[in-house]
Image (cartoon, rainbow, N blue to C red):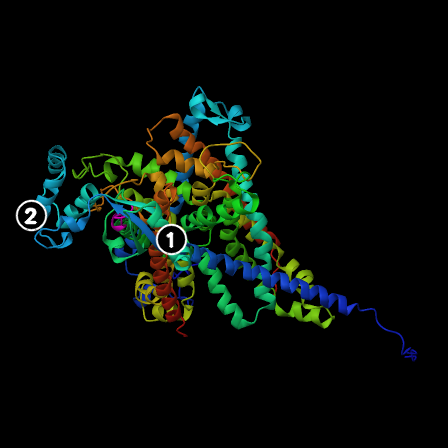
Amino acid sequence: MAESLNQKFDNGYPASRSGLHKRLRPGEAIIQGLLLFAGFFSIFTTLGIVYELGKEALLFFQMPEVTIWAFISGTKWAPHANEFGIWPLVSATLMTTTIAMLIAIPLGLSVAIYLSEYASPKMRDTLKPMLEVLAGIPTIVYGYFALTFMTPLLRSIFGSGVVEIYNTASAGLVMGILILPLISSMTEDALSAVPRSLREAAYGMGATKLETAVQVVLPAALSGIVAAVIVGLSRAIGETMIVAVAAGAGPNFTLNPFKGAETMTGHIVRISGGDLSYDSVDYNSIFAIGLMLFVITLTLNIISQQIVRRFREVYE
Amino acid sequence: MTDLPLDPQFTFGDNITRRNQTGGIWQAVFRASTVFGILALVLLLLNILNQSFGYVAYEAKVDPVSLAVNGVALADLPKEELVKVLQAKISKAAFTKLEKDGSFTGRTSDEILGLIYERVVKYEVKETWLLWDSLTNRARIAAEVQKNYPKAKLTFESWINPGFITRPQSSNPVIAGIRTALLGSLWTILFTILVAFPLGVGAAVYLEEYAVDNWLNRLVQTNINNLAGVPSIVYGILGLAIFVRGLEPLTSGAIFGTVDPTTANGRTVLSAGFTLALLVLPIIIINSQEAIRAVPQSLRKASYGIGATKWQTVWSHVLPNAMPGILTGTILAISRAIGETAPLVVIGASTFITFDPDSPFSKFTTLPIQIYQWTSRPQAEFRNLAAAAILVLLALLLSLNAIAIVLRNRLSRKY
């Protein structure tokens, strides 16, 4: 990173003999201290997250009505009735995430393969900014889209008796559209990083374009693709506004995607949107759920970084 | 080499036709996926446009035309006349209560006009139609309005108009505007940048120029990369615990003695700004690091060569050359922060305030939260308002990104 300037002259004479000293500059030291503080500030953020979430979550688990066993295995979440099972919230999160991934992974990979292998440079220059726009739209706009377009569409396809007004399917579908550009841009970067020589060699052996793309380039970029999928997954788990608007309010343990159910993130938003008294059960439950979210997404991100580090193919 | 007899009837079974066919099918699939992505974007924008314009049928309880004094329309009356109109039309008890809440001499004439619209004219939306409907079924809609709401006026309304941006929030959808939310957003972003920019650029300078490659600094770098992937709602929870609750004396202004009398708690613009600053800090750091890394070493060496110290080199040579990239990263961070809803809801942004934020210790609401509020209401006219607000938000983001792209093009100065 930085270079040391403390070099001695190598002609044998100490530097001081020629009159050159390193002048003492307290200003530099102060500035370096400030920069050091700025650099380590992010560590304070992480420590703050872990400490605050952990402290309040501990308070939550220490409450007499809550036991860890009930938290992990219970299937009803009704704090006023002293039921603290986390499964309704987790199952809703899993459902929306699964539906989103079912949309985003195949489509994202296809778009990335098209952009990197098939598209002309001019088309790539027009399409990539459009996908970046898709990625930059705020999630509340996607939530609005899910509620005002996707839900009526689903209701007209499957019938309004089958599909409720708030359901996890439309939230999941729109979340898939949200994550698609993320996966496609990271995958496209990974595919473009594969050197041309591999493709030329495959063509030289008589492979068609499809065979080159799928049997040569894709496996070579696999670590980047897996990392992209995991990042997309972690983004889907942490997504809040789409599910808060479109998926429903009220924990519901169901596997039917056409029914409303509240995810972990939607629950946090709903509880904290109302009047919240500090140290109540609801307040502390936010921290317990938040801690779970933080741990899950952090683990996924670390796994994705490790995969890239260990399995990335390095070409000279 | 012996001659191998080449049988002219011998064909290599290369299966090329079928392979090409399969290739063609999959190419169509890939192309279709790209089309789907673009289609989703187009549908999204069209849906919002569809909801932002259209016919509205609304009734006024008291026609504002009848409130004109001496032929001068209501909107053009001076403040004293407006107060007289208000006093004449609402009950004495309500008038004295309004006077108590805030004396009329202190209020602007716009505020009093708003009160008149709210209490006296009392617009009520009977029904709204989407843009597509309004353009194609004009006659049918007119007939419907005649039949169902004979007293109502039918106008083609653009829900996004200059008045929409300058009017304050209101519970009546006809006169509601986004001024409070827009100002709240701008105040919040101001504090976010004030905190995040120095910290972020400082951290990037430290990591790129001063940090030695040991385990501690590698940990810091990994930590920053991980923080970039933490869901935004976790930052909201952190902000709730630390800024709203823990630092309440600071963020509510109690230390400085300027506390908002209606609520003395930490749910203020300051807490929101700090929380969003934590959220965008990793983005600024990572982008600034890349910008600083792109400055060629030769520049630094030349500076050392003429005797500059490290900080002088950084301040006079590295930073100015990295500034376009740093600014691009900052603008990306601002775009991210403007669109964030979840952390601010957790912090406790107010759900309904009508006065503009005027200090760092005031309650606030932001544009995305306003959109969230309006989307959650069951009445259809609030969807139209939400669509109009979304258009404003998207326009804001588009202009920010355009500035970022212009800056990025300026970056391509070759050395």
Type of the residue with mark 2? Glu
Q: Nearer the viewer, mark 1 or mark 2?
A: 1
Sequence-first tag of 1 and 2: 2
Going by the numbered disc 1, the residue's amino acid type is: Ile
Task: Give the residue displayed 40% in from the left and 36% down from the top.
Answer: A270
In the image: residue B148, left or right of residue A115: left
Q: In the rendered picture of this protein, how many numbered marks are placed on residues?
A: 2
Which residue is rendered at x = 76% and y = 69% of the image?
B17
Asked if residue A32 shows in the view, the reply is: no
Q: Is residue A85 visible?
A: yes
Q: Give the quadrant of the C terminus of chain A.
A: bottom right
Quarter holding the N terminus of chain A? bottom left
Q: In the structure shown, which secondary structural element does the residue marked by tag 1 occupy? A: helix
Gap between marks 1 and 2, in whole Å?
A: 41 Å
In this rendered view, identify the residue nearer to me: A286 or A34.
A286
Q: Which residue is mark 2?
A: B80
Look at the image and give the residue range highlighted in magenta. Answer: B173-180
Residue holding disc 1 = B141
Can you say whether B118 is above or below A210 in the image? above
